[in-house]
Amino acid sequence: MVIITGGAGFIGSAMLWQLNCMGEDEIIIVDDLGFTTTEKWQNLSHLHFADFISKDLFPDLLERGALKKISAIIHMGANSSTTETDADHLLTNNFVYSKKIASFCMANDVRFIYASSAATYGDGSHGYRDAIDELGTLRPLNMYGYSKHLFDRWALRNNLLDHAAGLKFFNVYGPNEYHKGDMSSVVFKAFHQIRDKGFVKLFQSHRADYKDGEQLRDFVYVRDCTKIMAWLLQNSVAGLFNVGSGTARSFRDLTTATFSALAIPAAINYIPMPEALRDKYQYYTCADISRLRAAGFSDKLTTLEDGITEYVQRYLSSNQPNFNCSQSEKA
């Protein structure tokens, strides 16, 4: 039995789809569906799993031994808002909750794969290497990143990373992110701005060394993320790994690719960045994925243009934009 926490969320439900495509449906989903207006439940509606457990009940069920024959826990559940200001809430949901699950896995020899974040790298002044011995040099810029960083450091101190795999996700985009609101990808936002207004708004640059729209990110397609997680599930590889494309691309590139996928000439308006964000804004991120490659993951990753084209044409422009077990494409 595989358990996916955050299994109705973006990456969690995409991983459920990945496992379904691999013929697996003995899966327990742990999550909180929240208000029905989020439509988060739709991420599960076309997928197969054995049971659903509330995230609030899950730690106690683990502790009481009520869940049997668990082979792996894929822990994607967290508050992923980079603008969340309730520090106690983030510590409880992203740090304390994760420690409970990790402790169970260590005590019961259960495979553990968990979500960290590229937000732990802060302004990137120390680079984007996922070397464990450099964890102490990182300074996250927001409380979300700090909550993830705290767990990474706890995992290191408690030797969890000798057996488990932590994943520092960069800028993930793709199907099933539709409930995320302001935290949805720029691709998703650009698609709807183009459809509704005919143009896309991007932040101006407030640094002399970057032109407007030339701020750089490592954008990674969610299907590449689940491919990596599936590989980790099938192999006893442990450690902390970056999950990105390994290439930095500009927001202008991303927006142009979105227009191209819709066969519409690009129209971009540059607007001032809110002052509250300027001191916490990353102008460059790029995943160093050399450790993942050295560990044995050799699959080709999706280019930005190919990923956006598939996302826009096959999903966003479809009457069924969610991952679906009946879809003919292979995972």
Image (cartoon, rainbow, N blue to C red):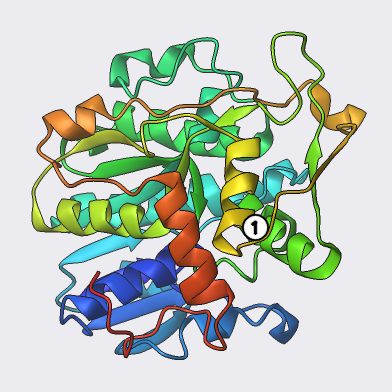
Kindly tell me whether residue 176 is visible in this rendering.
no
Residue located at (57% from left, 23% from top):
284
Q: Disc 1 residue type? A: Ser
Regarding residue 84, the answer to whether it shows in the image is yes
> Where is residue 143, by image quadrant?
top right
Query: Is 87 on the left-hand or right-hand side of 152?
Result: right
Give how far across and how far down residue 8 sits, in percent: 49, 75
Viewer-side residue, 149 vs 221: 221
- Residue at 33% x, 35% y is 155
The residue carrying pointer 1 sits among few (fewer than 14), some (14 to 19) or many (20 or more) residues within 10 Å by Cα, namely some
Look at the picture and state if 71 lies above or below 305.
below
SS under mark 1: loop
Quadrant for the N terminus in the image: bottom left
According to the image, label 1 marks what residue? 184
What percent of the width, then of the height, locates residue 71? 15, 67
Query: Quadrant where the C terminus lies?
Result: bottom left
Q: Nearer the viewer, residue 65 or 184?
A: 184
Q: Residue 96 location in percent, x, y?
A: 50, 48
Which residue lies at the image location 64% right of the left edge and 61% below the top edge?
Answer: 188
